[in-house]
Each structure stands twice: as structure tokens, then as C-alpha cells.
Amino acid sequence: MKLYADRVPTAVRQLITDLLVVLWVYLSIRVALWIHDVVLKLAVPGQKLESAGSGIADNLAEAGSKVGRVPVVGDDLTKPFTGAADAARSLADAGHQQQEWVDQLALILPLMALAVPLALVLFLWLPLRLRWIRRASVALAVRDEPAGRDLLALRALASRPLSELAKLGPDIAQSWRAGDAAAVDALAELELKRLGLRRSRV
């Protein structure tokens, strides 16, 4: 498997691109973690509200139970404490719900922040990189074989711009069809150069 080109300019470009992609993914993950931490801080008011509401509800319930022991009027005196305790529990529930919403946002927002960078890497950079690796590996496997060089020459004839082919001579296609070794080598070299590979193993 060929990961990088033989020719220095192409190899340097590939290496820099790979490093930039790794840096891009790393920074995207760091940003997503930062968003997660920032969003989680929004849960602090909910935590305080839940804690305060629960504490007030417990205190009111305890006070109501003590007041309820008063003979004759104990039940009547307990009702306001019970109502206030229920209201405090409602506040505690609201604080708990707010924390649940924040927890969901702390999961969704970082995923959304990661989605675009990772999609660019997975659907743009990675397919191009894998395609080059596959083509370069095949080219390496066939470049030193006569039939393989003929295939590389055919690939160059089919894919390279006419301006590049014309530089090899006006009758380059005819020479290739005739099996001219120099023409085949020139076309194969053109295709290898496009892939950033050398003519033969060093």
C-alpha cells in the first residue's frame, strides 16, 4: 500500500494536507467539548432551583407536621404549609426539567458542531485520499512490467489533457498503437508523474 508519493512536491502536499486534516478534526473535537462544557454551565441555575425548592418543601412539610399536632385547629393550620410545600416541589421539578433540557442540549449542540467538519473529512478528503492510495498502489505494482507500462500509457491517453499529450508529439497515439517503446514509456511516465510516482524503483 502506497501512502505517499515518491516525488517530493506531491508528497509534501499530501503530508501537509493530512496534517491539516488531523488538526482540523482535533480542533473540531476541542470546540465540541468546549460547547459541551459551556452548555452544561447553564444547568447550574436549575440545580440551585431544584436544591432550594426541595429544601423549602422539606422544611415546610416538617413545619406543617409540627403545626398539625396543635389540638383542634392543627388540620386547618397545616393546609397553608402543605400548599406552600407543593409549590416549592413544583419549583424543584422545574429546576430538574431545566437540567434535563440542558443535558440534551449539551449532547445535541456538540454533535451538530462536529457534524460539518467530520462530514467534510469523511465525504470529501477521505475518498480522494483512498482513491489516490488505490491508484498509486496499482501503478506501483505494474510500472516495471511491460504490460503494466502499456496500461499506464493507455490511462494517460484516456485521462490527460490534449495539451500535455501534444507535447509528446503529434503522432503519440499512433506511436502507442504501433507499440513504440519510447512512446509507451513517455505516456507511462506522464501517468506516473500525475500520481507523483517515479519511473522505476530506486
Image (spheres, grey):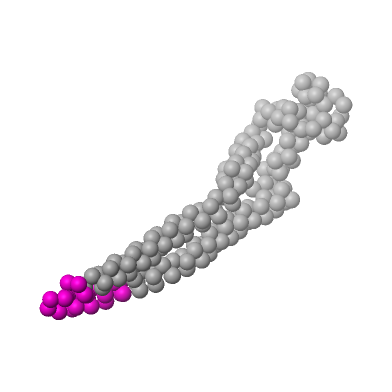
For the residue pair 172 and 57, the one nearer the viewer reads as 57
Q: Would residue 61 be counted in the magenta stretch?
A: yes
> Looking at the image, can residue 69 be seen?
no
Q: In this view, does 41 lie to the left or right of 191?
A: left
Q: Would residue 119 be counted in the magenta stretch?
A: no
Quadrant housing residue 161: top right
Task: Provide the residue span drawn in magenta.
Answer: 54-77
Q: Where is residue 40 in the image (x, y as percent from the top left)?
A: 46, 65
Q: Position of residue 110 (x, y in %)?
A: 51, 57
For the residue pair 3 and 93, the one nearer the viewer reads as 93
Quadrant housing residue 98: bottom left
Question: Relative to 177, does residue 11 appear above or below in the rendering?
Answer: below
Question: Relative to 17, does residue 94 appear above or below in the rendering?
Answer: below
Question: Relative to 170, does residue 19 appear above or below in the rendering?
Answer: below
> Looking at the image, can residue 132 be seen?
yes
Q: Position of residue 129 (x, y in %)?
A: 62, 44
Identity of the residue drawn at 69% across and 47% down: 6
Identity of the residue drawn at 61% across and 56% down: 24
Q: Is the magenta stretch mostly helix, strand or loop?
A: helix
Q: Where is residue 53 in the image (x, y as percent from the top left)?
A: 34, 71
Q: In this view, does 28 lie to the left or right of 14?
A: left
For the residue pair 191 and 55, the one nearer the viewer reads as 55
Identity of the residue drawn at 51% across and 66% down: 38
**Count the marks: how many?**
0
Identity of the residue drawn at 59% across and 51% down: 117
Q: In which quarter of the image is the N terminus?
A: top right
